[in-house]
Amino acid sequence: MKSAVVVFPGSNRERDMAAALTKVSGTAPMMVWHQDTTLPDVDLVVLPGGFSYGDYLRSGAIAARSPIMAAVREKAAEGVRVLGVCNGFQILTEAGLLPGALMRNAGLKFVCREVKLSVANADTDFTRAYGAGAVLRCPVAHHDGNYFADPETLARLEGDGRVAFRYADGTNPNGSVNDIAGILNDAGTVLGMMPHPENLIEALHGGTDGRGLFESVVTTLAA
């Protein structure tokens, strides 16, 4: 699987993401700077976590207007898989690639801890390695992870099976509506999620619950 990780000023999880992709796929991703205007021929584009542009204005708002995002939109339109984690999820919503918005956490504090996630839809390119309803451990680290969408959008997301992950067992850390932790686009090829699966993919991390997401993508693209 060929992949690329987009790096913005303020990204701080790009190396973690690159390590996870290398470990699971066996191939190191290409690192792409935000001012580039083209992406290489890849199967997966990843927008990693961090605080692009210091979260100035709104989280992800400036990064969504970076030169590279036109190329990300083109790749997404072609069916290339796109994954946005934490700040990457925020960028995807700001760029219009996913609906809704990520608002300030309900507790108005930065949250950095482990939560539980349930797999809301196990029949997606990003979740097939998990069983339906599986509950995973996963770290979070964010200040603006409170997912919100209008009732019509929520009904469409729920009805179309586009909620990929939910916070489980009362561990919702941010007040996200319907406990939503990750959503998909209409085609199921773009996933945005707040938790960090890349930080729980090997035993030295304390567990491997996040590994299934990357294995799902690798298996899907190899089919």
Image: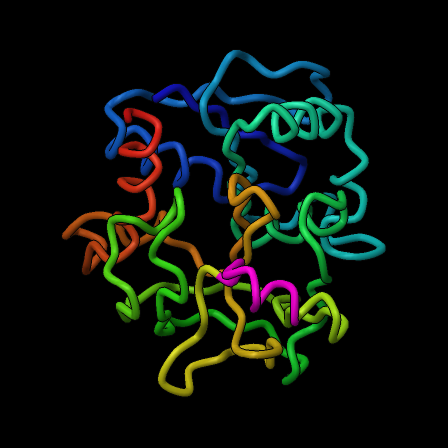
| Left or right: 184, with 166 as reference point | right
Residue 30 vertical position relative to residue 129 in the rendered view, above or below:
above
Q: For the C terminus, give its image quadrant.
A: top left
Horizontal and vertical percent position of residue 24: 24, 34
Query: Which quadrant of the figure has residue 159?
Result: bottom right
Q: Nearer the viewer, residue 175 or 99?
A: 99
Query: Which quadrant of the figure has residue 53?
Result: top right
Inspect the magenta stretch and tell me whether residue 98 lies in it.
Answer: no
Query: Which quadrant of the figure has residue 16?
Result: top left
Q: For the N terminus, give its image quadrant.
A: top left
Residue 117 vertical position relative to residue 85 in the rendered view, above or below:
below
| Left or right: 110, with 215 as reference point | right
Let me know if residue 182 appears in the view.
no
| Left or right: 182, with 185 as reference point | left
Name the residue: 74% across, 39% down.
Answer: 63
Name the residue: 50% across, 61% down.
Answer: 161
From which residue to which does the magenta span run?
A: 155-163
Residue 147 vertical position relative to residue 223 in the rendered view, above or below:
below
Residue 23 vertical position relative to residue 183 in the rendered view, above or below:
above
Name the residue: 42% across, 55% down.
Answer: 196
Q: Which of 65 and 185 is in front in this view?
A: 185
Name the residue: 51% across, 22% down.
Answer: 31
